[in-house]
Amino acid sequence: MLSKLAFRNAKRSIKDYVIYLITVTLAFSLIFAFNLVGSSKEVLGLSDVMNNFKYSMYIVNVFIVIVVCFLINYTIKFMFSKRSKEFGTYMILGIKKKQISNLFTLENIILGFFSLIISIPIGYIFSLFMSFIIVSIFELPNSVKIDFNLNSVLLLLLYFLVIYIFVLFLARKRIKKMKIYDLLYYDKQNEKIKKSNNKIRNIIFIISLILGISALVLFSNQFTGVGQEPSMFIIFICLILAIISIYGVTITLSDFILNIVLKNKKLKYSKDNLFIARTFSSKVKTMSFTLGTLTFLITITLIALNISSLFKGMFDYQLELNSPYDISVEDDKNNLNNYIDFISKNYTIEDKLIYDSYKDLNNNISSSVDNYPGWRSTDQIIKLSDYNKLLELKGDKKVTLNEDEYILHVTKEFQDFIKDRDKIKGIKLSNNIKLKQKDFVNKGYTYAWGTGYGFVVVVPDKAVEGLEVEESHLIVNTKEETTEKFAKELVKLREPDLCEKDENDYMVCYSLANVRVRGQEEANNDGFITITSFVCFYIAFVFIAVTGTILAIQSLSDSTKYKYRYSVLSKLGVGDNKLYKTIFKQLLIFFIFPIIYPVNISFSVINSMNRIFKIALVNDTIYINYFIINFLIFLIIYIIYFTATYFGFKRNIE
Amino acid sequence: MKEILKLENVKKYYGKKSNIITKAVNGISFIVNEGEFVAIMGASGSGKTTLLNCISTIDDVTSGSIILDNKDITEIKEKDLADFRRKELGFIFQDFNLLDTLTIEENIALALIINKEKINDIDDKVSDIASKLDIKDILKKYPYEVSGGQKQRCACARALISNPKLILADEPTGALDSKSARMLLETMSNMNEKLKATILMVTHDSFSASFCNRVIFIKDGRIFNEILKGDKTRKEFFNEILDVLTLLGGDVSDVK
């Protein structure tokens, strides 16, 4: 009989508890999808460093499982509140609490398992979508095929078991504590009215705020600039302070605002302010802990999204710095044809440029810097016409020069080393030609123009007369995307020069920098960046889903309670349109409230981190763009949840 | 006559020590004998539902004892309460408390199924009680497919089927229209007279109360008065109840 009842209720619950099913299915689908991607052979095969990726995914999953536990625990509580009257009736009829507890457990296992089963195909579809995103974000050469592997299914099953054993254990404990009276009259319980002491509350609010600010300042002090390693211990302390502050502020802020509204008669009695402020405040009081947690999750989401962007920005910048062209080679002029032959065997050549770079023995530039970071002994000179072609192949605009002018193009780091910029306003080359500086460019430099300099001097074509050629360069853009494998073969053409045997008979290769292949840079250079970026993205995605779902569930589960309040408003003569407006406002405040603090915190954190990251980013303020874009991405997903909640709410009220 | 229920100085206070204490039930004592149909009347907030909740073990008492069939229910252990409720008590609620997922028949049979009675016995008992309460036609239907009056009669059948010592009813007519209410009260009266069920009913409606043998009036958590029907007609008894209510003061507007 018990199992029959459980089965029937579960079947009926499918209709009633769509929210529960969606929540659990969504959570498991996301976990499954990311695991599929993380364990896919093709993703792991992208480059050698990707193996670490697998392990970082395991660690992140532990974190995610904890959050999903929180989510499912919340949903089960919600379901329980909906069923409490029924359970009360069972108890009245003399069914033992233990049996009811078993019944509820069985039901949840049935529903959870059902969700688990659906989440496998849905998760697979998600993973395909995700692989598409990964390919486009990380500019990977080919599309990534995700293989459906049993390992991920087993892992998902393990997570399911861990989550459900824990969550159901909590649920059973809750039921054990409940009295029959609580069950029967659960839906009649009001939001708790805690008489809070205003003075204490204000003090808590201010202390929390101070704690938060000091955490941010402390954090900021850890990131003063490149070269100073942040102390993990202090960052940990910042984290603790920030968490305390988030909870403290969330719990007290609404009351703080309410007090202001209530004190000001004009504010209090205008429009529906009173109703909204009171409803909101009582709501925050009942679910202050949950809201605190949500605020914390949103903070992490925003920070994770932005860190993901910073790493992605670093990745892009590194790529442009090292290999903006598909293939670039420095070698003797005689050898260049060998490369061209080899390349054309593998790819279709779209553009090709062969040019020479010259030596300036006067070392005008390198002698004017402190601690010259390059290892060349002469300055690098290239002709304007070659420079323009190089710019063109990169997709940049051409420049012009008068006969007596030159351009100095440097890396971002290099500009800091120049001690006296006025001294190089006018230079004299080793062929005695005098040139004035027309431009000082610090954006868009690439090491593909010459390894070991950090700068290039661009002179009019005629000015190189009498200068010795340093080396010859080959730049090729191919139609197809280049690969890591091809790069390794191309390097072999130069092996005699690059590698030699040491005394122990080991082959030692000094540098591969003379041969650059974009495909290799993409695949290999920044595995760590890819991993971090992807993992942050994963965390952000799951957390947004968790936050949105909890807010939606919370609002929708309340809608029955609010039905009564709205019918009272309606009887007092508030029209339908006005009612909807009030509902809209009320939900909007409820959704916006947990974002306010995180936006401030995450911006401050990213601002601090940028001090270290900026050296490897296109420019110093790009992080603001990232922040805005990420916030918009977050908002879009958030707004979807909000809209769904609003319409669901409206339907429940009608 | 045999004593079924005996309350001795029952008190139920709400609120913590530091706060203001609400004395919902403040020292009530009375006795219900076997075969009686007793009403507890009072205005809203007088403590009548709290009292019923205490008797039905839904809520616990602050002090005093409630003795049902020689057992003090305030001393039964939590884990044995379920068994006790199942064997000794039947419930009828204002909002029916039927299970939506079960048919009327299954709802009635539920208590027997929990008692693990024989399947044939269950069927016989259900159809027997259903015909007595005139709900035989709707046995296969679900609660949401039948009227409020039918639902409440189903609840009566459920309460009766395990032959409890005492049936507790909390505003059973509260959610019914006057015709259904009258039918239900006649049914309950029948249950009392023909099936020998002992019923304790809480109500604020004097019409409902006039169907009982005895009415206990409660005010501010204490017994205010008690009247017996005796040989009076229902009409006379009704008028007598109205008189007491006038004396009782408070919200006479509640009275029909």
Image: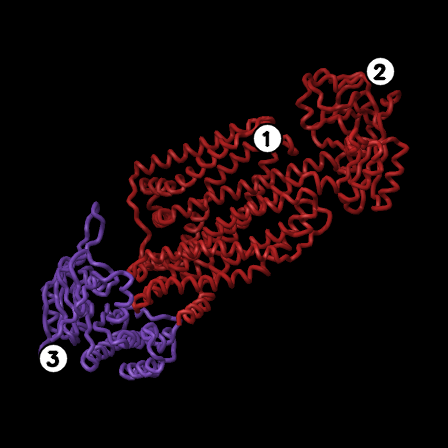
Chain colours: A red, B purple
Would you place residue A491 above or below residue A411 in this image?
below
Q: Which residue is mark 1?
A: A612
Q: Which residue is mark 3?
A: B233
Q: Position of residue A501 (x, y in %)?
A: 81, 31
Closer to the eye: label 3 or 1: 1
Residue visible at 21% across and 45% down in the picture: B18
Q: Position of residue A149 (x, y in %)?
A: 63, 57
Q: Within 10 Å of the Cα at label 1, are there few (<14), some (14-19), or many (20+) other Cα atoms?
A: some
Residue A190: image quadrant is: bottom left
Q: Chain of mark 3?
A: B
Residue A333: image quadrant is: top right
Q: Dots 2 and 1: beta carbons under 8 Å?
A: no
Q: Which residue is mark 2?
A: A432
User: Quadrant where the C terminus of chain B lies?
Assistant: bottom left
Q: How many marks?
A: 3
Three-letter code, disc 3: Thr
Q: Chain of mark 2?
A: A
User: Quadrant where the N terminus of chain B lies?
Assistant: bottom left
Residue visible at 56% across and 33% down in the picture: A609
Could you give the CA–CA distance between mark 2 and mark 1, rounded to whole angstroms?
42 Å
Could you give the CA–CA distance between mark 3 and mark 1, rounded to whole angstroms?
95 Å
Q: Position of residue A635 (x, y in %)?
A: 53, 47
Three-letter code, disc 1: Ile
Is the same chain shared between marks 3 and 1?
no
Give the number of the disc on residue B43.
none
**In this view of the protein, can residue A580 be seen by the observer?**
no
Is the same chain shared between marks 3 and 2?
no
